[in-house]
């Protein structure tokens, strides 16, 4: 991977931030497909056979196009690294991802804002998945104390294709998070969306997940888990639309509240085809009392038991 001389220090600073968080630093080695963004600069870009990444620097950010060829199965994930090393500012990144037919690929997206105190990050991601392909997209975040994040992802899942999208913000402040994910499914397409967020202090979280099951025999599963402490506020909206013959969708929301946190969840199911089937499961409340008692009986304090239960819910 070629790094411009005048960007070497930024590059090294991002590597250091990755190492400090215990993240995989293989994306910096130049043997996998990668784009590395710092602020409004592209500081690293590497392509491999079957993957073409093109990047363009725009005002306050970067726009990138990622193309995966037909019949490609990558041994390593494609890394999309977005960083910002200042304490204040605004960054906008746009990703256009096009996956060919009968391919299998994993994306790892890391957003690293370790020193943010008054910073806004806006991300727009558009993903088109060709027939018979399988895509896994992991989106993980490392935030400072003052990040406002606005994220919108739109996915078109082709005939017989599969998309799994996972968003995680559990180890750092959410502060102000507005996340929207919209997916449209073709015939026999499969969708899995999972969001996990921990909100503390006066964090504000808004999550909206929408699935349009347009194709016959399409399937979708939307799952969200939000843990809200202190004075945090959270709103979770999950929508599923049964449009195709024998389409099946399930919505699952779990929110845990502690302190003076304010949480609401809205599952919305709408069927426009009498052959479609949609279901939902939702819960809001404090940590399970029976689990707390069981763990405390083994010698844990209430706080220790609660933390262990929360880690289990968030998959930590």
Image (cartoon, grey):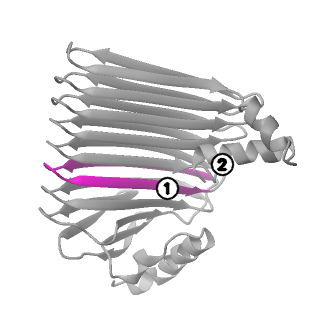
Q: CA distance from mark 1 to mark 2?
A: 16 Å
Q: Quadrant of the C terminus?
A: bottom right
- The stretch in magenta equals 118-143
| Up-down relation of residue 109 to residue 219 (above or below) | below
The dominant secondary structure in magenta is: strand
The residue drawn where x is 19% and y is 31% is: 217
Question: Going from the N terminus, do you reach mark 1 or mark 2 first?
Answer: 1
| Kind of element beneath mark 2 | helix
Query: Mark 2 — residue?
Result: 311
At 84% from the left and 47% from the top, the residue drawn is 298
Residue 305, percent across and down? 78, 44
103 left or right of 287?
Answer: left
Horizontal and vertical percent for residue 171? 63, 53
**Quadrant of image for the N terminus:** bottom left
Which residue is labeled 1 in the image?
Answer: 140
Q: Give yes or no for residue 203 being in the magenta stretch.
A: no
Does any portion of residue 174 appear in the rendered image?
Answer: no
* Residue in the image at 25% along x and 75% along y: 47
Q: Secondary structure at mark 1?
A: strand
Mark yes or no: residue 187 visible. Answer: yes
Q: Is residue 131 magenta?
A: yes
Give neighbour class at mark 2: few <14, some 14-19, many 20+ (Cα, 10 Å): few
295 relative position to 113: left or right: right
Residue 154 higher or lower than 6, as above or below:
above
């Amino acid at each position: 991977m070629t790094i411009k001389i005048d960007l070497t220090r930024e590059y090294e600073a991002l590597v250091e931030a990755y190492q400090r968080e215990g993240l995989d630093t293989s994306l910096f080695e130049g043997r996998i497909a990668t784009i590395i963004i710092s602020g409004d600069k592209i500081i690293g870009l590497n392509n491999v056979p079957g993957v073409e990444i093109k990047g363009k620097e725009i005002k306050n950010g970067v726009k990138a196009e990622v193309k995966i060829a037909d019949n490609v199965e990558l041994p390593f994930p494609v890394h999309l690294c977005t960083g910002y090393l200042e304490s204040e500012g605004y960054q906008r990144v746009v990703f256009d991802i096009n996956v060919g037919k009968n391919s299998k690929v994993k994306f790892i997206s890391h957003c690293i804002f370790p020193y943010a105190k008054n910073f806004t990050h806006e991300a727009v991601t558009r993903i088109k998945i060709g027939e018979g392909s399988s895509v896994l997209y992991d989106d993980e975040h490392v935030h400072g104390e003052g990040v406002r994040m606005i994220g919108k992802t739109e996915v078109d899942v082709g005939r017989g294709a599969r998309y799994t999208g996972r968003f995680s913000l559990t180890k750092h402040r959410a502060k102000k998070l507005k996340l929207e994910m919209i997916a449209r499914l073709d015939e026999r397409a499969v969708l899995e969306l999972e969001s996990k967020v921990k909100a503390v202090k006066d964090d504000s979280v808004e999550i909206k997940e929408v699935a349009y099951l347009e194709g016959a025999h399409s399937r979708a599963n939307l799952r969200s888990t939000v843990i809200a402490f202190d004075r945090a506020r959270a709103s979770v909206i999950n929508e599923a639309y049964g449009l195709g013959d024998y389409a099946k969708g399930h919505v699952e929301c779990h929110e845990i509240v502690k302190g003076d946190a304010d949480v609401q969840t809205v599952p919305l199911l709408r069927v426009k085809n009498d052959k479609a089937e949609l279901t939902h499961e939702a819960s809001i409340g404090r940590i399970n009392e029976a689990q707390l008692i069981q763990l405390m009986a083994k010698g844990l304090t209430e706080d220790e038991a609660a933390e262990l239960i929360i880690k289990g819910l968030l998959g930590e």
